[in-house]
Each structure stands twice: as structure tokens, then as C-alpha cells.
Image (tube, grey):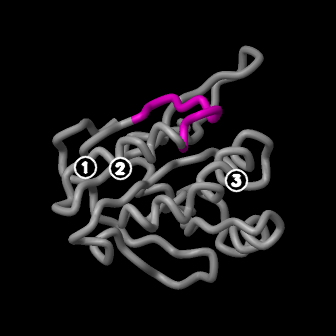
Amino acid sequence: MIKEGDKAPGASLEDMDGAPFTLAQFAGKPLVVYFYPKADTPGCTSEAQAFTALADDFAAAGAPVIGVSKDKPAKLRKFTDKYGLKVQLASDEKGGFCEAFGTWVEKSMYGRSYMGIERSTFLIGADGTVLKVWPKVKVKGHAEDVLAAVKAL
């Protein structure tokens, strides 16, 4: 996993409408990038709703929030519309972005090993440097912790 002080990896992603974008588009301002396993599952929904509830506060602090999963753009669009999400969601179907950040990891459940996204969040500074990393995120209270870190910049 990339660490605080590292430069954020560059990559091209697709937004929930299938349009390409890169993190470079956000240069000059802080950026929150959170990785989540799968859209429209309980934990991921709670996390997206928590960031949505604070979307205006993140915007006021000048820090866009982007959620990244390996879901297809169409699924992300449905997820956004279903819950009225106010954060930008991005698709990393091929997984290169997740791998570059180190969030594509081996996991296990009920004795079965598999590869998946580790719920993690990164605060990236205006210059592209990773300022803060939250690995193995627990959803409750997390969006508030990230907002506090953004406001402390």
C-alpha cells in the first residue's frame, strides 16, 4: 500500500457515466480517494452515504471525494441514483488503479482466500503527495475523521 509522503499514482479511470478522467484533473487542490469492495452492499452503501452526508462540507473545504471500486460504470450509476449519492464514483474494472494504491489484496472469509479491495482512504494534497492513509477502514465515523483531516490542512 502506498504510504504518507508518496506521490499518488496516476491512472485513467471511468466515471459512473463511462467518461474517462484522471487524478491529474484535480491538481492544485486536496482530494479524498476512497476504495470500497462493491457497490450496493451494506458496508459500501453506508460508507457512500456517510461521505454524501458530508459532501457539502468537503466541497466547502475544497476537497472533492471520489469513491473507487471495480464495478462497471453502469452499476455505479444505478448505485448513485438509488441512494442519491453526492460523491463521484469511479470504475477501475481492470484493477490497475487499485493495484497501484495497494488496495487489491488477498482476503479470506470462512476459510476461503480470494482477491478483493481493502476498504481504504487516501487524502492527497494539492501537489499530488499522499498526506494521510486510512487502511482497513471501519465505516462508522470514518467520513467525519477524513473531513477533520481535510479541515486541518
The residue located at (41%, 55%) in the rendering is 32
Q: Amino acid at mark 3?
A: Gln
Give the side of residue 92 with respect to residue 124, left or right: right
| Above or below, comparing residue 14 to residue 98 in the picture | below
Camera-nearest label, 3 or 2: 2
In the image, 130 versus 84, the foreground residue is: 84
Q: Secondary structure at mark 2?
A: helix
Start-end of magenta stretch: 134-143
The residue located at (78%, 54%) in the rendering is 40
| Above or below, comparing residue 105 to residue 94 in the picture | above
The residue located at (48%, 61%) in the rendering is 65
Q: Residue 101, how many percent across, how many down?
A: 36, 46
Residue annotated with mark 1: 153
Q: Residue 27, how many percent across, how many down?
A: 24, 71
- Labelled disc at residue 49: 3
| Above or below, comparing residue 13 to residue 128 in the picture | below
Camera-nearest label, 1 or 3: 1
| Image marks 1 and 2: residues in contact by CB distance under 8 Å | yes
Residue annotated with mark 2: 150
Give the side of residue 8 with respect to residue 32, left or right: left
Main SS, magenta region, reads loop
Q: Amino acid at mark 2?
A: Val
Q: Secondary structure at mark 1?
A: loop
Which quadrant of the view contains residue 132?
A: top left
In the image, 36 versus 141, the foreground residue is: 141
| Image marks 1 and 3: residues in contact by CB distance under 8 Å | no
| Figure quadrant of the N terminus | top left
Q: Amino acid at mark 1?
A: Leu
Say few, some or many: other residues with alpha carbon within 10 Å of mark 2 (under 14 / 14 to 19 / 20 or more). Answer: many
* C-alpha distance separating marks 1 and 2: 6 Å
| Above or below, comparing residue 102 to residue 61 in the picture | above
